[in-house]
Amino acid sequence: MTVEPSILAGTKEESEYIRRRLIEFNAKKVPAHLASRYEEINLAVKDEEGRVVGGMLAVLCWNWIEVDILWVHESLRGMGFGSRLLQRIEVIAKEKACTFVKLNTFSFQAPEFYRKNGYAEIAVIDGAPLGSRHYFFKKEIG
């Protein structure tokens, strides 16, 4: 008799294992020159005392970079740090021969900021979370 697998909460190590397995599967489905292109790219903004006051978490995947998180401390917003982070990731994307950068944000975060920085809205989900919108943006890198 076969026992059916259980679905349980996973550990951090199990999450990494699952991520590696999917990356390995995907690598077999894309052109060979892109197969091994997967890299975390993390940028930090630090104050004069070395404290992190902003930053970006992103992933290079095949021929694009996906920004997962862009955050700047409230006291520094509107001073250009977010735009500088975007500009830096776009330079990295160009250096690594990526064709675009994509990211997402919510209506209560920064959709206008991304538009101002040249990102085109490619999709919106209403009611995510309830009462808000979830935006997806893309910028071509040339």
Image: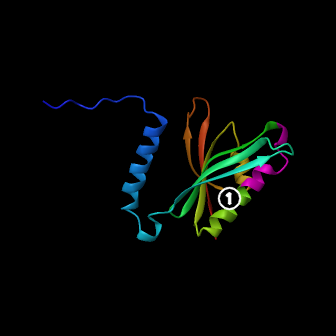
Instruction: Give percent across and percent down for residue 119.
Output: 66, 56
Which quarter of the picture shows residue 66? bottom right
The image shows residue 24, relative to residue 124, as above or below, that is below
* Residue 82 part of the magenta segment: yes
Q: Quadrant of residue 107?
A: top right
Render colour scheme: rainbow
Q: Position of residue 79 (x, y in %)?
A: 85, 48
In this orientation, does residue 32 appear? yes
- Residue drawn at x 54%, y 41% is 125
Mark 1 closeness class: few <14, some 14–19, many ≥20 residues within 10 Å? many
Relative to 30, does residue 45 appear above or below in the rendering? above
Which stretch is magenta? 75-85
Residue receiving disc 1 = 89
Q: Is residue 76 left or right of residue 21?
A: right
**Between residues 134 and 13, which one lies in front from this camera angle?**
13
Q: Residue furthest left?
A: 1
Q: Would you say the magenta stretch is mainly helix, strand or loop?
A: helix
Left or right: 4 with respect to 72?
left
Q: Residue at x 59, y 40 (%)?
A: 134
Label 1 secondary element: helix
**Side of 4 where 16 appears, left or right:** right
Q: How many marks can you see?
A: 1
Q: From the image, which quarter does the N terminus lie in?
A: top left
Residue 91 to residue 72: above or below: below
Locate residue 31, reporting x and y percent: 41, 68
- In the rendered structure, does residue 63 fall within the stretch colored magenta? no
x, y (%) of residue 139?
63, 60
Q: Is residue 141 visible?
A: no
Q: Amino acid at mark 1?
A: Ile
- Position of 123 with respect to 34 (left or right) is right
Quick one: quadrant of the C terminus? bottom right
